[in-house]
């Protein structure tokens, strides 16, 4: 069993034995690529998928690599935007081993990730790491819970962490929830019919549900896209069929248009070179680009990595193979499928990019190559394409008074912080971090900072979630007008009584709605939906 697990662990590493000739950098944008750090034993080595980079409150980038370090079992690192690199922690099996995951920044300022193994190649852990490199295990997996996690957990709007395991459960992987205190729950065990072997991290969409992919399984066996509620109800949104993609390693990203974007490593119509796709919430999938794996083609192919939506509104990604140097490509693609290769990787400065890119708030794109570099063990790189800087708001949604962190650069000179035009009180903690909270009267929209160092806008809209505090009367027949009191009601689009939509309601103010109990209403809780989310009353309205 141990030998089989070692074999599975090192399948991606076999690619490192490919012999690459040293070739010149090609492409018009080659001068914008910077090799920031070359991995080399006893340093950490071979960053791989998912390999998520996290931007910390200090403006530095944090990540993991599955191999190398003091014990050869990988570890966690920090790198400044300019390339100053340091190892924060080397795993030795005691607290886990072989972290493929990369890291997630939590709202507490700490980082969260997973190890694929722990101890003598057992089943992996979920861990927390402080910015200084102190690691704490939140949970050690057992087989029936789900095991062998590749992906880092993500933090949901409820403050809990959600993630996937590639195996275990009933044999096909699982979705789990773990609290910051380590209380663990398996939400769903995959059964192959609904997908198998989820590799990528989840995302939480604007509807509050989680979305993810499975590498294989589904009705055709080529992988799935799924939706799962915080309570664990799973729905398959798409079954890949080879023609539209196969073998899904990448996470999804929800674009500003509300659609989901991702890649498939294989499949498509050009010699199974993989695809980039768009999937609507109504389950309509469109192939945006077929990667070409035909011998002699200079198009990139086999994209393990997912897409990011950069500050120019377009999607950026890397393909692990192909290109003019047969070492992979960095590309940009629009929401309508216009595709451009921006850079052809060169073995001497990094090749085989597996991990999904990260755009730093300085506007530059950062990423990791699994192979290449001076020692052949991978590289950390940046790519400058004159994209504008921005701020990150964490979390991306919340109720009035909820604490919020703003990440960026040049924040020391900030004079105002606004949530969709509403001024907020704030504290400047450092040049890269502001502490604030959602102001009363705020509505869903972009967060902006202004000051002598310039004006900056958040990379995505902050969703102000409504709250129902009370309603009066608490019971009545159909046709009864009910006054609902709370906050953040501006722009409300729907009111329901026990799940039945009210056909007559008016938004009286930011704090009050008057709604008429609709025909067919049943006893149940009242809900109010706005562009920022849905509020649910604590108690039920009784229909007489």
Image (tube, rainbow, N blue to C red):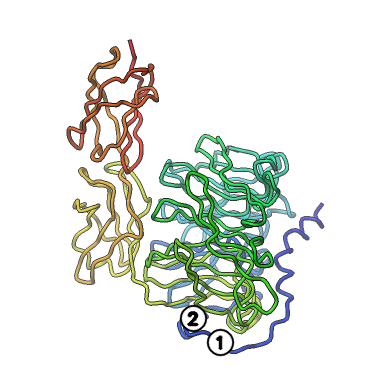
- Identify the residue shown where x is 43% and y is 74%: 81
> Who is closer to the viewer here, 86 or 217?
217
Label 2, secondary structure: give it. Answer: strand
Q: How crowded is mark 1: few (under 14 residues within 10 Å), some or many (20 or more)?
A: some
- The percent position of residue 315, horizontal first and vertical second, equals 46, 64
Q: Residue furthest top?
A: 544
The answer to the question of whether label 1 and label 2 lie on touching residues, with beta carbons closer than 8 A, is: yes
Q: Mark 2 — residue?
A: 33
- The percent position of residue 173, horizontal first and vertical second, equals 67, 45
Q: Residues within 10 Å of mark 2 (few under 14, many from 20)?
A: many
Q: Earlier in the sequence, mark 1 or mark 2?
A: 1
Determine whether 54 is above or below 341 in the image.
Answer: above
Q: In the rendered view, does 418 fall on the left or right side of 160?
A: left
Q: Mark 1 — residue?
A: 25
Q: Is residue 130 visible?
A: yes
Determine whether 38 is above or below 263 in the image.
Answer: below
Label 1, secondary structure: give it. Answer: loop
- Identify the residue shown where x is 37% and y is 17%: 520
Cα distance between the residues tagged 1 and 2:
10 Å
Q: Can residue 89 be seen in this view?
A: no
> Who is closer to the viewer here, 84 or 521?
521
- Identify the residue shown where x is 26% and y is 16%: 479
Determine whether 361 is above or below 535 in the image.
Answer: below
Q: In the rendered view, does 288 fall on the left or right side of 478?
A: right
- The percent position of residue 428, horizontal first and vertical second, equals 26, 61
């Amino acid at each position: 069993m141990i030998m089989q697990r070692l074999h599975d662990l090192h399948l991606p590493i076999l690619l490192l034995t490919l012999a690459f000739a040293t070739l010149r950098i090609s492409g018009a944008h080659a001068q914008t690529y910077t090799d920031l750090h070359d991995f080399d034993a006893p340093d950490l080595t071979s960053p791989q998928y998912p390999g998520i980079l996290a931007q910390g409150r200090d403006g530095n980038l944090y990540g993991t690599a599955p191999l190398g370090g003091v014990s050869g079992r990988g570890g966690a690192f920090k790198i400044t935007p300019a390339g100053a690199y340091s190892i924060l922690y080397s795993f030795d099996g005691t607290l886990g081993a072989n972290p493929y995951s990369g890291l997630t920044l939590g709202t507490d300022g700490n980082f969260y990730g997973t190890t694929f193994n722990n101890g003598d190649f057992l089943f992996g852990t979920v861990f927390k790491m402080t910015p200084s490199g102190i690691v704490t295990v939140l949970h050690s997996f057992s087989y029936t819970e789900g095991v062998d996690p590749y992906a880092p957990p993500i933090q949901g709007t409820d403050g809990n962490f959600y993630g996937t395991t590639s195996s275990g459960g009933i044999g096909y992987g699982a979705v789990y929830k773990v609290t910051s205190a380590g209380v663990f729950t398996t939400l769903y065990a995959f059964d192959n019919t609904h997908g198998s072997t989820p590799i990528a991290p989840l995302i939480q969409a604007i509807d509050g549900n989680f979305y993810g992919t499975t590498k294989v399984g589904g009705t055709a066996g080529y992988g799935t896209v799924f939706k799962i509620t915080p309570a664990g109800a799973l729905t398959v949104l798409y079954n890949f069929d080879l023609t539209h993609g196969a073998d899904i390693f990448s996470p999804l990203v929800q674009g500003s248009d509300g659609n989901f974007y991702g890649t498939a490593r294989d499949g498509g119509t050009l010699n199974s070179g993989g695809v980039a796709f768009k999937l609507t919430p109504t389950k309509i999938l469109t192939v945006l680009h077929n990667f070409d794996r035909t011998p002699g083609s200079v198009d990139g192919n086999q994209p393990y990595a997912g897409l990011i939506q950069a500050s120019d509104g377009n999607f950026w990604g890397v393909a692990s193979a192909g290109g003019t140097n047969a070492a992979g490509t960095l590309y940009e693609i629009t929401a309508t499928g216009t595709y451009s290769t921006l850079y052809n990787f060169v073995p001497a400065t990094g090749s085989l990019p597996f991990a999904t890119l990260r755009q730093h708030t300085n506007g530059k794109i950062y990423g990791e190559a699994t192979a290449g570099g001076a020692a052949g063990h991978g590289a950390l790189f940046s790519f400058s394409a004159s994209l504008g800087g921005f701020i990150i708001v964490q979390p991306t949604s919340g109720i009035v008074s909820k604490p919020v962190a703003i990440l960026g650069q040049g924040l020391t000179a900030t004079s105002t912080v606004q949530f969709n035009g509403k001024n907020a009180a704030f504290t400047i903690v450092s040049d890269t971090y502001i502490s604030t909270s959602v102001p009363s009267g705020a509505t869903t929209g972009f967060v902006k900072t202004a000051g002598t160092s310039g004006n900056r806008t958040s990379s995505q809209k902050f969703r102000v979630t409504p709250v129902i505090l009370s309603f009066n009367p608490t019971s009545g027949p159909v046709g009864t007008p009910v006054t609902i009191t709370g906050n953040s009601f501006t722009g409300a689009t729907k009111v329901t009584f026990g799940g039945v939509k009210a056909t007559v309601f008016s938004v009286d103010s930011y704090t009050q709605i008057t709604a008429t109990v609709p025909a067919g209403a049943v006893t149940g809780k009242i809900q109010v939906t706005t562009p920022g989310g849905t509020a649910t009353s604590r108690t039920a309205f009784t229909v007489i």
